[in-house]
Amino acid sequence: MSKSDVYQGCRGRLIVLAGRLSAPQLRAPVPACPGWTVKDAFGHLVGAATDYVRDNMDGAGSDPWTAKQVEDRRTAPIGDLVEEWQVHAGLFDKKYERAGNEVSALASDIWCHEYDIAGALGWRGSREPERVEWGVRAVRAIPRLLEATGLPVPTIIADGETVVEGDGPILRAQAYDLARMVYGRRSWDQIRAMDWDRDPEPYLEHLSFFPAPADDLID
């Protein structure tokens, strides 16, 4: 799937979901994003899309950039957020389709947050291979994450398929959990509990783009 396919698929599902959520569900905390509610997660995603269309990408991905998106929309009704997202959708899609892989982070961001929202609502995220594959692609970045550590690259097997081949320990796990791990959505205890053929301790802090959560995340 292309970055545009991923983004549009996630956006479409989230827009449908937004219209079905109750006020208590919108206020539910998102464990994967401490301090955010479900509605705040929508505010960030909508704000990121608007910022992209308006070329407001200075500091993209930073805490201040993200925090402003959330704060600017904190009091807006969810319907207004959906309307803002839809208003910019056509321009976003045209611009995103033409852009290179340097903006693939927007697809990864919405991919992560769709699952974050599902977890916050107590739902099980989709394990469909075509949905999970985008996250599994990021697992292939683990050798790069390990470059400065001197650790041998592990062999990583996702749902029986080798996605990273190395001389280090062997890690076998579900593709979904590996994808969530590399985006900082699995605690060290959850990573330890995966099927390693030797001690994973030296690797724990080097297997994701973001710090691991202190508590287990269930999604």
Image (spheres, rainbow, N blue to C red):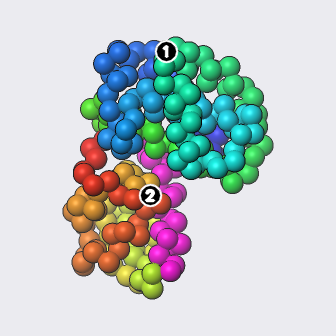
**Do we see residue 45 in this rendering?**
no
Q: Quadrant of the N terminus?
A: top right
| Residue drawn where x is 32% and y is 33% of the image | 29
Q: Is residue 99 above or below residue 192?
A: above
| Residue drawn where x is 23% and y is 61% of the image | 189
Q: Is residue 67 above or below residue 179?
A: above
Amino acid at pointer 1:
Pro
User: Which image quadrant is residue 4 in?
Assistant: top right
Q: Which mark is residue 63?
A: none
* Local crowd size for mark 1, using a 10 Å CA cut-off: few (<14), some (14–19), many (≥20): few
Amino acid at pointer 2:
Phe
Is label 2 in a helix, a strand or a loop? Answer: loop
Estimate the x, y position of residue 41 in percent, counting from the top left. Answer: 46, 33
Is label 1 in a helix, a strand or a loop? Answer: loop
| Residue drawn where x is 37% and y is 38% of the image | 35
Q: Which mark is residue 77?
A: 1
User: Which image quadrant is residue 200 in?
Assistant: bottom left
Estimate the x, y position of residue 165 in percent, counting from the top left. Answer: 45, 75
**Highlighted range, magenta:** 125-148
Q: Is residue 113 left or right of residue 25?
A: right
Q: Is residue 153 above or below residue 81?
A: below
Residue closer to the observer: 97 or 19: 19
Dominant secondary structure, magenta = helix
Q: Which residue is mark 2?
A: 210
